[in-house]
Image: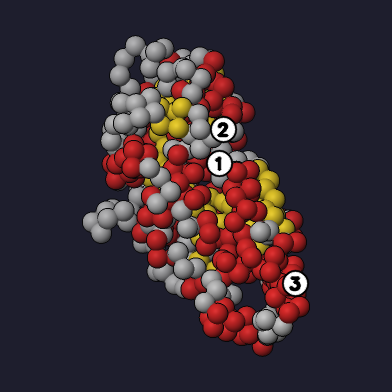
């Protein structure tokens, strides 16, 4: 598209009062009649005529590659979003080694730290997003409140910005150019079966309590699992870390040694990589305590089985993800991708994610799409006035229930670390694999 055409489209939208989103959605429907009659002049016909034929290929983990989102994109924006769900390791590998196989990468920030320097993705211009101002400050400066301490690990803001439009170097402060536009995050802890455990669970150290020998599990994604392991080892007093999010080789070795000893003693029933695996382990009763994600706990509860997402005295391990754009994306497809990202931040998806137990990166817009009772339950730690439903309309919590861990501020304010890629990442992954194979 030429500069003149871009200017013509910008002037057309400004002069007619048509929003960019309205234009994207309605362009294909009105173009033929409007241009044929001569009612609109200077109209970028090829852009408008082809928007309905645009297909953007998105890949990422199953956490946020949701078919309902793709359906809503088609309804609201008029183009097609193809989604592919992979595990975290496969996501990182594909982003680097198959850059032409995707248009949009829906990835976590620890993955971003690994892949963005490879140059397969393009920095995003925040001035193109009218909903940018609603993004949580956690993704801008790392602080929930002005007085918050920044948790250890790969906090999103540390890899959220680059120095310029063509840069792959992470910026030390916010700039106009983001690596990912944040979309989703959460504070993770241990899931337990309270009906099968006879005492209170208060610490990460409980994961390795011999009382649960053969009934414990930890997730097998190195950059995430190592942080859970560190929380456990620190709580047990086995390892003292300078920075859990960037361990030395000695700290890594000590951490893995503790985990190998536990494995050889028969502590672990299994290791899991996928959402469904964690649900099945807990629902079956094979496991009574394990690393878990909030919606997985809700999925177990939806089966009528007791399951608690247990707040722990040492705090939570947090993670966050966002949407990034492939380097090759340009022209009409790039404009559609920006429109999709801005739409993602406008509230409908945020409310959908909140109803699953995650957090929207733009909470203020998500609130507009939630009832007062839903917002009170998921975000404010209030008892539900009525049954709390999933995005699909299934009962997740009965009236009177209170969310495990309380309010958004209580949960995200108790984060001790983020999922992390360390300077000694290769060493860590090698040692982690030794643990799994031991």
Total residue callouts:
3
Q: Which of marks 1 and 3 is nearer the N terminus?
A: 3
Cα separation, mark 2 vs mark 1, equals 8 Å
- The residue under the point 52% across, 62% down is 342
- Whether the residues at callouts 3 and 2 have beta carbons within 8 Å, the answer is no
Q: In which quarter of the image is residue 220?
A: top right
Position of the C terminus by quadrant = top right
Cα separation, mark 1 vs mark 3, equals 40 Å
- Whether the residues at callouts 2 and 1 have beta carbons within 8 Å, the answer is yes
Which is nearer the eye, 434 or 196?
196
At mark 1, the secondary structure is loop
Image: 182 above or below 287: below
- The residue under the point 68% across, 46% down is 84
Q: Earlier in the sequence, mark 3 or mark 2?
A: 3
Position of the N terminus by quadrant = bottom right
Which is nearer the eye, 53 or 144?
53
Return the residue found at the far front. 37
At mark 3, the secondary structure is helix
Q: Which of marks 2 and 1 is nearer the N terminus?
A: 1
Instruction: Indicate the position of residue 183 as horizontal and vertical percent values.
Output: 49, 53
Residue to which mark 1 is pinned: 63
Residue to which mark 3 is pinned: 32
Residue to which mark 2 is pinned: 275
Would you say 289 lies left or right of 167 here?
left
């Amino acid at each position: 598209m030429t500069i003149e055409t871009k200017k013509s489209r910008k002037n057309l939208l400004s002069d007619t009062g048509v929003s960019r989103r309205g234009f994207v959605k309605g362009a294909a429907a009105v173009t033929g009649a409007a241009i044929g009659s001569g009612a609109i002049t200077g109209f970028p016909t090829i852009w408008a005529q082809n928007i309905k034929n645009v297909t953007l290929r998105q890949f990422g983990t199953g956490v946020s590659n949701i078919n309902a989102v793709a359906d809503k994109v088609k309804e609201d924006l008029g183009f097609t979003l193809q989604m592919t769900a992979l595990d975290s390791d496969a996501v990182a590998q594909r982003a680097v080694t198959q850059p032409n196989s995707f248009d949009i990468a829906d990835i976590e920030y620890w993955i971003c730290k690994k892949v963005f320097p490879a140059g397969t993705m393009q920095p995003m211009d925040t001035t193109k997003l009218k909903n940018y101002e609603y993004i949580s400050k956690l993704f801008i400066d790392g602080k929930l409140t002005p007085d918050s301490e920044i948790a250890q690990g790969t906090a999103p803001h540390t890899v959220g910005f680059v120095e310029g439009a063509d840069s792959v170097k992470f910026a030390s402060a916010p700039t106009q150019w983001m690596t990912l536009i944040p979309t989703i995050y959460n504070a993770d802890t241990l899931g337990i079966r309270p009906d099968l455990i006879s005492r209170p669970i208060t610490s990460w150290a409980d994961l390795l309590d011999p009382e649960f020998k053969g009934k414990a599990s930890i997730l097998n994604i190195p950059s995430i699992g190592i942080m859970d392991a560190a929380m456990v080892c620190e709580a047990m007093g086995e390892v003292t870390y300078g920075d859990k999010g960037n361990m030395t080789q000695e700290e890594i070795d000590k951490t893995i040694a503790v985990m190998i000893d536990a494995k050889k003693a028969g502590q672990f029933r299994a290791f899991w990589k996928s959402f469904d695996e964690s649900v099945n382990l807990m629902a079956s009763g094979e496991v009574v305590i394990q690393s878990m994600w909030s919606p997985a706990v809700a999925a177990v509860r939806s089966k009528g089985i007791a399951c608690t997402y247990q707040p722990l005295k040492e705090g939570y391990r947090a993670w966050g993800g966002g949407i990034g754009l492939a380097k090759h994306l340009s022209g009409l497809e790039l404009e559609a991708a920006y429109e999709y990202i801005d739409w993602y931040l406008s509230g409908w998806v945020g409310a959908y994610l909140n109803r699953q137990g995650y957090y929207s990166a733009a909470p203020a817009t998500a609130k507009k799409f939630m009832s007062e009772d839903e917002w009170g339950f998921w975000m404010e730690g209030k008892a539900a006035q009525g049954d709390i439903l999933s995005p699909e309309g299934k009962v997740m919590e009965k009236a009177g229930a209170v969310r495990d861990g309380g309010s958004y501020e209580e949960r995200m304010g108790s984060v001790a670390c983020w999922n992390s890629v360390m300077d000694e990442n290769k060493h860590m992954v090698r040692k982690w694999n030794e643990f799994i194979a031991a």
